[in-house]
Amino acid sequence: MKSKYDIVIVGAGHNGLVAACYLAGAGKSVLMLERNLYVGGATTSQRIFPDYDAYLSRYSYLVSLFPQQIVRDLRLSLELRRRRTASYTPFWRGPEADGLLLSNINEAANRNQIERLHPDDYKGYLLMQQRIQRFTDKVWPSLLLPLDSKEAWKNRFREPEDRAVWEWLVEKPLGEFIEAHLQHDVLRGVVLTDAKISANTHAHDPSLLQNRTFLYHVIGNQTGEWRVPVGGMGALADALYQQALRLGVEVLTGAEVLHIHPHSTQPSVTYKVEDKEVTIQARQVLVNAAPAELKRLVGPAPVSRPPDGRPPVGRPQSTTAEQEGTAFKVNMLLHKLPPLRSGIAAEDAFAGTFHFNQTYTGLAAAFEQSQRGQLPERPPFEIYCHTLTDNSILSSELQRKGYHTITIFGLDAPYSLFLSRPEQTRQQLLNQYLATLNEWFTEPIQDCIARQADGTLCLEAKSALDLETELQLPRGNIFHSPLSWFYAEDTGGVGQRGVETDFAGILLCGSGAERGGAVSGIPGYHAAMKLLNQELR
């Protein structure tokens, strides 16, 4: 290896790989340092259950915010497949099990489904979608441009209808927007879930964190549709990795970065690989990690992690000031899909996002209970079946036998709930999820889950605390830090890319950058453009 590179990138997640491809394509020498033995970070497919040839998207699992411009620029071989079902939400109609089935391809069916809930809700739902689309058409194209001020953005919404949309989505709590358009508790809850993905917030939160979270979940590629990466999330990471290699990027895995030394022209990075510490110089360092992790790495050089994996002495813990993650992730392999009490075909219900305990009032109650330090009595969560849209992640034998992969994504399970009794609390919440599933299925979900050779269920559960440990996500926040607005939140950010830091020679290129979060590649793009445009000037 060389002793100096133009660019050293800390972390080989998808954002770092995007930046690497653009920079190497412009002729820069690029080294990526990744502490794991695989690339992709949270964007990975893994054989979680060794007895079965099935590669599950272990952490992130759907794609909406990855711009087609990046796909074209980098000539990525990537297929994102549409799900025929948007969502299914079971509910009780008197003593009978019923459900709301929304389609991505049949609007007439959607009208029938929504009008069964409330005669006025389809009209309100359409108006809501139209207003979101007006907003999306203006905002989405800007996400690959430098940041503009809030006032400049507000001026783009001068028309009366545009101004109303701005007020609903940017100035007022999202709950007001939802309540003004929809009446039924179930449909209101379906809409609100997009505002609560891993966000410790509620419909009327004065901080408007729910608004920011909602916007990133509905504007992707001007459709807001979340698509299935064919081959799993690892296919996206692999497409980027292969292109990076073709462009000459050097990638070193098993390399734990210990310290970053800021400098305006010659920053350096110290890392450890196979018990050997190495310091390497660069013209610029990009950090594909959380802002809190960046601060740790530029502090006093930390002690190397002991061989047993314990945190080094004196390593700072996450602070309560940082936004708590609330995600709870479960991966399962099923040998069959369970039938539903409502009578709807499992293949239709499981093909989209399957909501549980996510009525509007139920979400409010769950949030309040979680803030009192309790697991919610009716914990909200949703499930997703990758293999109904793309079964290429299964071996031909598992496909033939009808196996399926299932992801559970839980809400309102904040990091702090798992600090005192992590294993017991994780198991308690998992048991609540399984009990809820069994309310709506005619067969116990446990009887449908495949078993490994030792008899254990093919099931793994990860709390926000586990996500912090495994992925170095501060307080388990999958977005690295609270999501930002799409505009510069102070005058100093106007005209910037949202990747700048207070440290000389160092840029962020991960989800914690402004306009980061989710699988988008946008921070990686901005970090690369920041450097390349600086050279042009």
Image (cartoon, helix red, strand yellow):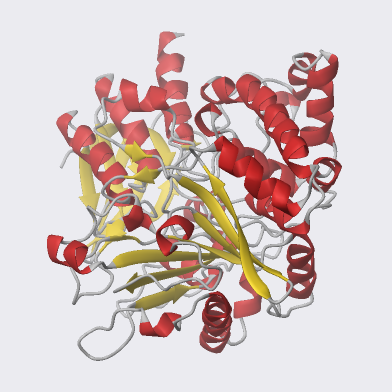
The mark tally for this picture is 0
Residue furthest to the top in view is: 537
Asked which quadrant contains residue 525, the reply is top left
Q: Is residue 166 above or below residue 276?
A: above
Asked which quadrant contains residue 56, the reply is bottom left
Residue drawn at x 45%, y 56% is: 348
Asked which quadrant contains residue 94, the reply is bottom right
Q: Nearer the viewer, residue 440 or 271?
A: 440
Q: Nearer the viewer, residue 536 or 330?
A: 330
Residue drawn at x 19%, y 38% is: 242
Q: Nearer the viewer, residue 340 or 375?
A: 340
Q: Is residue 35 above or below residue 503?
A: below
Residue drawn at x 22%, y 44% is: 251
Q: Position of residue 493 (x, y in %)?
A: 67, 26
Q: Position of residue 269 (x, y in %)?
A: 36, 46
Residue 268 is at least partly visible in this image: no
Q: The N terminus lies in which quarter of the figure?
A: top left
Q: Position of residue 145 (x, y in %)?
A: 55, 19
Residue 163 is at least partly visible in this image: yes
Q: Position of residue 316 (x, y in %)?
A: 56, 67
For residue 127, side relative to residue 63 (left or right)? right
Q: Nearer the viewer, residue 252 or 370?
A: 370
For residue 94, side relative to residue 535 (left or right)? right
For residue 254, side relative to residue 176 (left or right)? left
Residue drawn at x 43%, y 36% is: 521
